[in-house]
Image (cartoon, rainbow, N blue to C red):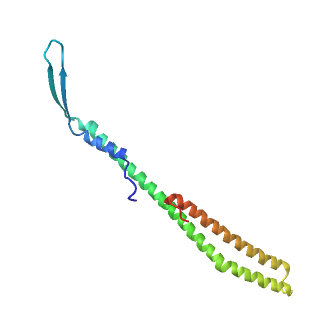
């Protein structure tokens, strides 16, 4: 969060400018006139402009700049919260997909394979009919499809995280 600049330089500058309107404007001028046939003339002028009616113009300008800065802060906080939510959502999706793929690979698919092998042995001895054997095969294929879907979901989640964090994860 420290990498984000709060608020933008434009908003900070407009607030400082509005606050400076409370101070008097000082001016100094020097003039030099060289006319032919006459002596040179030099002039110095000092001026001070006092903001006597600051409650009419300067205070609303400062209030407007302050509210613009607060709005900029809120917009930044909203963008940060949305970014962190997207990262967390994609991370949880990746974590879930990884755990499900691991569950398919270590428990569900080996168990479905054993069930199919048992079904093949039972079919050869006449213990079950061909439709039951096909059902066991279909179940194994369904679990394998689920495994590959979870691997694809894992890769999608990683692909969603990479642009959000700004670096390659694999």
The residue drawn where x is 27% and y is 39% is 58
29 or 18, which is in the foreground? 29
Whether residue 56 is situated above or below residue 106 in the rendered picture: above
The residue drawn where x is 62% and y is 73% is 100
Whether residue 124 is situated above or below residue 170 in the rendered picture: below
The residue drawn where x is 69% and y is 78% is 109
Give percent across and percent down for residue 21: 25, 38
The residue drawn where x is 79% and y is 83% is 119
Q: Residue furthest top?
A: 37
Locate residue 110 relative to residue 96 in the image: left or right: right
Give percent across and percent down for residue 108: 67, 78
Whether residue 22 is situated above or below residue 91 in the rendered picture: above
Locate residue 42 relative to residue 131 in the image: left or right: left
Q: Quadrant of the C terminus?
A: bottom right
Q: Residue furthest left?
A: 39
Give percent across and percent down for residue 77: 42, 55
Quadrant for residue 92, please give it. bottom right
Give percent across and percent down for residue 136: 77, 78
Locate residue 17 relative to residue 106 in the image: left or right: left
Quadrant for residue 19, please give it. top left
Q: Quadrant of the N terminus?
A: bottom left
């Amino acid at each position: 969060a420290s990498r984000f600049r709060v608020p933008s330089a434009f908003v900070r500058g407009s607030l400082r400018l509005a606050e400076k309107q409370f101070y008097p404007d000082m001016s100094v001028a020097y003039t030099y006139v060289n006319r032919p046939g006459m002596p040179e003339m030099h002039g110095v002028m000092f001026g001070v402009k006092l903001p006597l009616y600051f409650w009419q113009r300067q205070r609303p300008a400062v209030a407007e700049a302050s509210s613009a800065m607060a709005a900029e802060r809120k917009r930044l906080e909203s963008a940060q919260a949305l970014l962190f939510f997207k990262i967390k959502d994609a991370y949880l999706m990746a974590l879930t997909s990884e755990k499900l793929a691991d569950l398919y690979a270590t428990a569900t698919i080996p168990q479905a394979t054993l069930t199919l092998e048992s079904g093949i042995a039972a079919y050869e001895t006449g213990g079950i009919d061909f439709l039951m054997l096909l059902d066991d095969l279909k179940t194994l294929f369904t679990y394998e499809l689920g495994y590959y879907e979870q691997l694809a979901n894992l890769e999608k989640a990683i692909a969603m995280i990479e642009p959000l964090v700004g670096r390659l994860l694999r």
